[in-house]
Image (cartoon, rainbow, N blue to C red):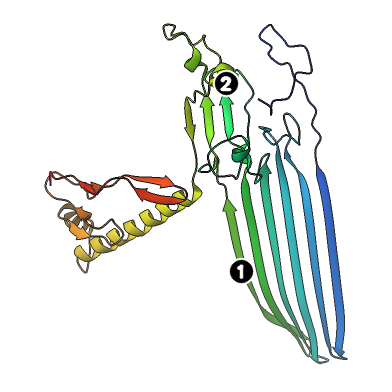
Amino acid sequence: MAYYPLPNRQPDDPTGRNNFISTPENVSDSNQYTGRVDHQITSSNTLFGRYSQQDHVNTGNTAIYSVVNIADPGLSLQTRHNKSGIVGDTHAFSSGMLNEVRLSFSRQYLLSAPAGYNIGAPARIGLPAIIPSTLFPRFDIGNDVTGSDMQSLGSSFNQLSQRGLTVGQLTDSLSMLRGRHSIKTGVDLRVHQRNNTQSGAVSGQFSFARAMTGNPQDTSGSTGFGLATFLLGAVSGGSLNSALARADAFNYYGVATAEAFVELMYKAGKNPTRASLMKAYRSWNEINPFLLPGNRQKTGGADQLPIQCDRFIKYTDGTFVPVSKLKCDTAT
C-alpha cells in the first residue's frame, strides 16, 4: 500500500472513489554530437570521415501517479541511442574518369521501459527470488467488475520492449566522359538487421477479484471488495512470462516438426504426391532425435496422433526440472 499515493481531493461518493488527481510531468532530453574529418591525400585523391550520435530520452506513456513512483501503472520512458558513421574516398584517375567509394553504417536502438524496470522491485516487496527482477509485478485489484475497485499497481509490462535496427552500406560509383557521352556505373550493397523483443509480464501479473471476499451465497457479483482481497493476499489468478522458456519451446518444436516432415517426404517416395504422403503418415513408426528418448512418432489404424508419450516438467530458477517419468499411451 505504500506505493499508492495519498488522497488529495474530495471523493465522488461515500466509497472514496476518485479521491486522487495528478498532472505528472513529461520528460524530454536530447543530446546530439557530430564530427567530421577531411583529408586530401594527393591532388587527385581525397578522403573524409563523419560520425554522428544522438541520445534521446522522452516520456512514452504519461504517469498516472508520479514519474518517481516505481509502481506507477501507466508510466513508460523511451530511450533512444542512434549512431551513424561514413568513410568516403574520391579519386580522379584523369580529367574524364572519377571514382567515389562510400562505406557507411547506422545503428538505432530503442528501449521502452515502464516504471520499476531493472531495480529489483520483486525483492523490495518481499517476493521470492524465483520471480524475475525485471519489472515491478502487476497487481490488478477488483478487475472482475467494470471499472475495477482500485487502480492497478505495478509496471505496465505491455510497454516493455527493445528494438534495434542496424544498416550497413557499401557503394562504389565510376563516372567517365567519352566524347559527348557521360557514363556512370557502380554497385550498391546494403545489409539490414532488425531486432524486436517484447517480453510481456516477465515479473508476473496477479489478479485480486472482489469475488474472493464476497458472499458465497450471493451470485450477483456485487458483494466483496477487490482491496479486501488484495490485503488478505488472496490471489484469484496470475501469470508469468518466461521469454527463455518460450523461445526454447518454439525452437525445439520448429526443428522437430521440420525433421518429421523430411522423414515423411523420404517415406513418400522419390516423386511424392498428396496420396503417397498421407499413406506414409497413416503408417508411421519413426524415431525423431528431437523428441525425448523413448518417444516415437507412431500412427496406425484409427489412431492418427503421432506423439504417444509425454513428461511433466517444472521451470525452476531458469532450469527445466523433470517431475515425472515418460508416460506413454499403451493403446497403440
Q: Nearer the viewer, residue 211 or 76?
A: 211
The residue under the point 65% across, 46% down is 118
Which label lies toward us, 1 or 2? 2
Most distant residue in the bottom direction = 94
Q: Left or right of 219: which side holds 273?
A: left
Q: Amino acid at mark 2?
A: Leu
Q: Are marks 1 and 2 in contact (CB under 8 Å)?
A: no
Q: Which residue is mark 2?
A: 231
Q: Left or right of 3: which side holds 237?
A: left
Q: Which residue is mark 1?
A: 191
Establish if 56 lies above or below 212. Answer: below
How many numbered circles does the render carry? 2
Name which quarter of the figure residue 135 lies in. Answer: top right
Disc with the residue nearer the chain's start (1 vs 2): 1
Q: Nearer the viewer, residue 270 or 245?
A: 245
Q: Report if residue 289 is visible in the image.
A: yes
Residue 49's x, y, as percent? 81, 76
Q: Amino acid at mark 1?
A: Val
Q: Left or right of 71: which side holds 230?
A: left
Q: Left or right of 44: which side holds 225?
A: left
Establish if 143 lies above or below 181. Answer: above
The secondary structure type at the circle numbered 1 is strand
The residue under the point 80% across, 69% down is 51
The secondary structure type at the circle numbered 2 is helix
Real-space CA distance between mark 1 and mark 2, rounded to the nearest whole angstrom: 54 Å
Residue 183's x, y, as percent? 72, 83
Viewport quadrant of the N terminus: top right
